[in-house]
Image (cartoon, rainbow, N blue to C red):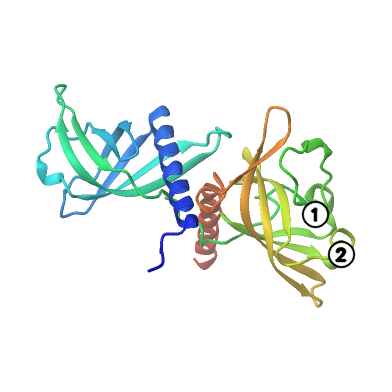
Amino acid sequence: MCALWTKDDKDDASRKRRLVLDLLEDIRDQRAKVKLDFEESVTSIKEITATLMEYDDQSLTLEVSALKGASGTWIGSEVSCFFRIHDREVRSREQFLTFDTRITGVEKRPSGMVHFIMALPETVKSAQLRRSVRVSVDQRKVPTLKVWRELPSGILVSDAKPLLNSETDAARGLKVDNFSANGMRLLVANALMHEALPEQRKGEHFSFHFQAVTEPGAPGATFWVNAILRNVFSDTQKGETALGFEFISEGFVDETRRLVWRPLRFDEVGGLGKFIFKWNLDLYREKGIGGA
């Protein structure tokens, strides 16, 4: 009988476990509050928050100050844990995350505090659920955008000359059409396309640097992303080409002004989800006003 557990499976499981342990370290070190969400059959208490006290490669212990006492009836209960942490490299970015686990033990400490011992979760997911939300935007929401063919990690940012730059090319027909937390679509006038990108191949990798703002004039956040070109559609009547990209990694500039890339941790660009949420909310408000 052949082995069903391959080396790739083991490597993937090991990567996921390392990611879980790294995030637990961030929760502990940042003293992030963890919100516990139980089924109604477990408890009627809606707002239960906890603090991560300790963890290892098998379990984690949360201190639950909202409870005065807890019996063994909690053991075996399934629970969803929600938390918010700051990105390690870009502290201004926040990530909203969640994992599912179960309670394996309950302790009442001499201090009177209740501790839940929980099984180590298998994986952590984004709590923002923005992956499938694609929002129409314009240059007011993404005031700056630069595009290169894929930039190598370690390159000096000052040495990288972009193929497209909204600061000069917006007036020549470069537009952002829509955004999601894991991709975007650009519209490029065919004349500009012929000049900057005369040849495009699906599957080719590009690098982007852009700024996002919640509303015109508001402080913005900057992002570095690598993306793969997924589709190309030229509209001869409109005289423009639509380019659809999927984000595959994100980056930051280190203290030496060199670019550093890292894989996406939850299939989306960290910190971008809150802008997608706000832009999507603004569209609903505008439709509501228009339909009144």
Amino acid type at image mark 1: Ala
Point 62% across, 55% down: residue? 247
Closer to the camera in the image, 176 or 246: 246
Question: Badge 1 local density, few (<14 within 10 Å), some, or many (20+)?
Answer: some
Mark 1, residue position: 170
Q: Position of residue 13 (x, y in %)?
A: 43, 51
Point 62% across, 46% down: residue? 250
Mark 2, residue position: 198
Q: Position of residue 37 (x, y in %)?
A: 27, 48
Answer yes or no: is residue 13 visible: yes
The answer to whether the residue labelled 1 contacts the one labelled 2, judged by CB atoms less than 8 Å apart, is: no
**Can you name the residue that lies furthest to the top here?**
111
- Of helix, strand and loop, which one carries label 2? loop
User: In the drawing, what numbered circle is on residue 276?
Assistant: none
Answer yes or no: is residue 179 visible: no
Q: Is residue 231 left or right of residue 170?
A: left
Q: Position of residue 108 (x, y in %)?
A: 14, 30
Closer to the camera in the image, 101 or 35: 101
Amino acid type at image mark 2: Pro
Q: Is residue 28 left or right of residue 131?
A: left
